Image: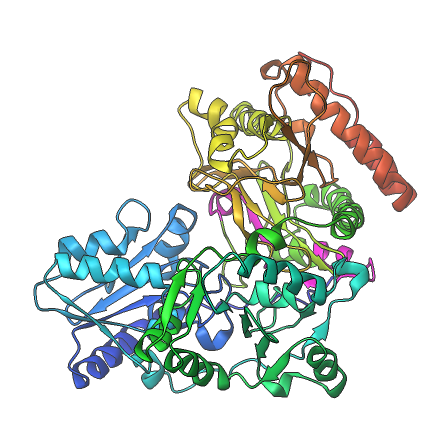
């Protein structure tokens, strides 16, 4: 009935290939006089999501998650993943070859200090590590009395005989009616920032920033419409965009050359070295920029000035056009999700649906809008115990039939030119157990606490994160991921610098869009997550307030399943928020739905009376 166009269900894990690949890597390392290699999941641009040709971590370990690091030595190997991927890594990685460590509790630097033998020569590729990250590795190696050895060509590439070619997706314009600000105005803002800096030029190494600055989009990375490119913005003169010229049509190149010099990607390293030879000072973000860039400048005689990426907060604060686009995209996407939820509610009890069926159906409903450009990430659709795998990706091998008594977690999103969406809903198949309802309600209470938060202007995500966990904590429960991440405007579904997390130190500014997604996961049983996107706005006036206050406007519009709500656990204010949210959902979505789905929506969003479980 349905078909997925933007995602596949092939098993990317190559468990059986791990042993010969690790053996071949060890031979290659020995040939070079090296004892080991550190393998991050990164590309030259430090992207979270990388093109197939940069999937070195997956190639050598079998682990396909979006965050992890491996260290391969001659006599042992270890892979580091965070809590989101603990179960996934256990399933994908050959435990006879790799030991699995917690990326947060015992990061690679600590492991190196504690486990690396003196005199060990540990190789790393400077293009695949940030400047800060490489310095931390060097410090750890020094503490172990080992050596951190830079390599120009990656040893994995030497053994990867069928490595995919680099992507050549066409560069396309991101129209002003979606961007809301032209490149000239953005460059003027960067120029004003540069006047405060002693640097002669700014390196823009993040493709999200490059794509935002030049109002361009691409298809180099699956589901993330960025162009893989670097840029240099001098204090005086024209900026330079470095991109594979095969990606540019004549019209696109002419358009870009109105505001910048356009040069092939290979010229970037040459120009960095030239700046160094001229004794120029180059500003870069040491937390996101590859160490190789700093090396090129310094080893040529130049100076590196560290400073946070000025584009990141500019990009994160959406303008009025982007905010209007986000609201339109959320309404359109919410109608598609609601059509899916109504369909699922009808079909799942019949016992024939699988996880793949659900993914294909939801994508189809989004494509029916006529405006979907892509999904914003591979849909996470976990039934029963699969829902407890935080970033579960269904394959034909793992595809589970959705059964009576399951909780079904579906986390998905769409890429539209006017906005990027990300939503998670958890729904019961048949009658949920009291335990499921209690856990769901505790998660919902945390979600509502974030949605209703009022906080001082300049507060950080770290200051708010506890709000989402407090009710779970009181029950001795928690979730092993951040509460929320920034979201781009037809860019990456994960955008910095702000996030709602214990690590979220960037101030939350009006105009930022973030996710609100607390959860709970019981391994082997079920997973729960409730996710909406929220916009940072000015709070309603508060009598006697002594400082400016902000709040969140919930952007996502789709029913939250009240069959999983234990009303007795909710306060009157929490029930009031849920009922008001569902009233908004009905009002916004009903005109976009067919009659049967509209009728389903009215029932699904019926007001919930306090103290009356459903």
Quarter of the image with the N terminus is: bottom right
Q: Is residue 112 left or right of residue 160?
A: left
Q: Is residue 292 left or right of residue 107?
A: right
Magenta range = 361-390
Identity of the residue drawn at 28% across and 51% down: 107
Check residue 386 for magenta coloring: yes
Q: Position of residue 344 (x, y in %)?
A: 72, 45
Q: Position of residue 383 (x, y in %)?
A: 56, 46
Q: Can residue 102 be seen by looking at this rendering? A: yes
Q: Can residue 62 be seen by looking at this rendering? A: no
Count of marks placed on residues:
0
Q: Is residue 489 above or below residue 443?
A: below
Q: Quadrant of residue 478?
A: top left
Identity of the residue drawn at 58% across and 24% down: 445
Q: Is residue 15 left or right of residue 556?
A: left
The colour scheme used to paint the residues is rainbow
Identity of the residue drawn at 32% across and 78% down: 301
Q: Quadrant of residue 509?
A: top right
Q: Is residue 265 above or below residue 119?
A: below
Q: Quadrant of residue 286?
A: bottom left
Q: Is residue 492 left or right of residue 598?
A: left
Quarter of the image with the C terminus is: top right
Q: Position of residue 43 (x, y in %)?
A: 44, 71
Q: Residue furthest left?
A: 118
Identity of the residue drawn at 75% across and 29% down: 581
Check residue 35 for magenta coloring: no
Q: Is residue 552 above or below residue 567?
A: below
């Amino acid at each position: 009935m349905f078909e997925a166009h933007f995602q596949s269900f092939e098993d990317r894990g190559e468990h059986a290939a791990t042993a010969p690949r690790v053996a071949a890597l060890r031979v290659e390392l020995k040939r070079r006089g090296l004892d080991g290699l550190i393998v991050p999941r990164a590309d030259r641009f430090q992207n979270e999501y990388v093109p197939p040709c940069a999937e070195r971590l997956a190639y050598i370990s079998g682990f396909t998650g979006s965050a992890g690091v491996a260290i391969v030595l001659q006599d042992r190997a270890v892979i580091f993943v965070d809590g989101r991927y603990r179960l996934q890594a256990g399933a994908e990685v050959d435990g006879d070859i790799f030991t699995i460590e917690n990326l947060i509790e015992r990061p690679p630097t600590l492991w190196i200090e504690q486990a690396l033998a003196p005199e060990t020569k540990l190789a790393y590729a400077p293009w695949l590590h940030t400047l800060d990250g490489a310095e931390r590795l060097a410090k750890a190696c020094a503490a172990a009395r080992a050596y951190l050895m830079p390599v120009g060509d990656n040893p994995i590439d030497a053994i990867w005989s069928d490595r995919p070619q680099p992507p050549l997706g066409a560069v396309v314009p991101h129209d002003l009616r979606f961007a809301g600000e032209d490149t000239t105005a953005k460059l003027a803002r960067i120029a004003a920032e540069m006047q405060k800096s002693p640097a002669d030029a700014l390196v823009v190494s993040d493709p999200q920033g490059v794509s935002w600055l030049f109002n361009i989009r691409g298809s180099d990375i699956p589901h993330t419409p960025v162009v893989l490119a670097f840029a240099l913005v001098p204090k005086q003169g024209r900026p330079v965009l470095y991109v594979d010229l095969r990606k540019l049509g004549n019209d696109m190149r002419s358009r870009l050359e109105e505001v910048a010099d356009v040069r092939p990607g290979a010229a970037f390293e040459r120009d960095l070295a030239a700046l160094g030879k001229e004794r120029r000072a180059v500003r870069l973000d040491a937390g996101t920029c590859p160490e190789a860039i700093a090396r090129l400048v310094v080893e040529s005689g130049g100076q590196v000035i560290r400073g946070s990426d000025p584009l990141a907060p500019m990009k994160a604060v959406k303008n009025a056009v982007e905010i209007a686009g986000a609201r339109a995209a959320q309404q359109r996407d919410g109608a598609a999700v609601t059509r899916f939820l109504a369909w699922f509610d009808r079909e799942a009890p019949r016992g024939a649906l699988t996880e793949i069926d659900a993914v294909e159906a939801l994508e189809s409903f989004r494509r029916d809008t006529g405006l979907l450009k892509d999904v914003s990430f591979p849909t996470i659709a976990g039934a029963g115990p699969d829902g407890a795998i935080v970033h579960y990706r269904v394959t034909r091998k793992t595809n589970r039939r959705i059964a009576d008594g399951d909780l079904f977690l579906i986390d998905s999103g769409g890429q539209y030119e006017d906005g990027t969406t990300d939503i998670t809903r958890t729904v019961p198949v048949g009658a949920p157990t009291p335990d499921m309802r209690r856990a769901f309600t505790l998660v919902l209470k945390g979600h509502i606490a974030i949605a209703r938060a009022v906080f001082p202007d300049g507060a950080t995500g770290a200051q708010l994160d506890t709000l989402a966990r407090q009710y779970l904590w009181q029950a001795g429960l928690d979730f092993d991921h951040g509460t929320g991440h920034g979201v781009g405007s037809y860019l990456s579904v994960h955008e910095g610098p702000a996030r709602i997390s214990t690590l979220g130190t960037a101030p939350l500014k009006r105009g930022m869009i973030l996710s609100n997604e607390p959860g709970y996961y019981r391994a082997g049983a079920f997973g729960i997550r409730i996710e909406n996107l929220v916009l940072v706005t000015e709070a309603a006036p508060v009598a006697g307030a002594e400082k400016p206050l902000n709040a969140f406007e919930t952007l996502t519009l789709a029913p939250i399943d009240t069959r999983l709500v234990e009303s007795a656990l909710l306060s009157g204010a929490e029930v009031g928020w849920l009922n008001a949210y569902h009233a908004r959902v009905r009002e916004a979505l009903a005109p976009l739905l067919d009659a049967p789905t509209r009728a389903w929506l009215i029932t699904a969003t019926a007001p919930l009376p306090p103290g009356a479980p459903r």
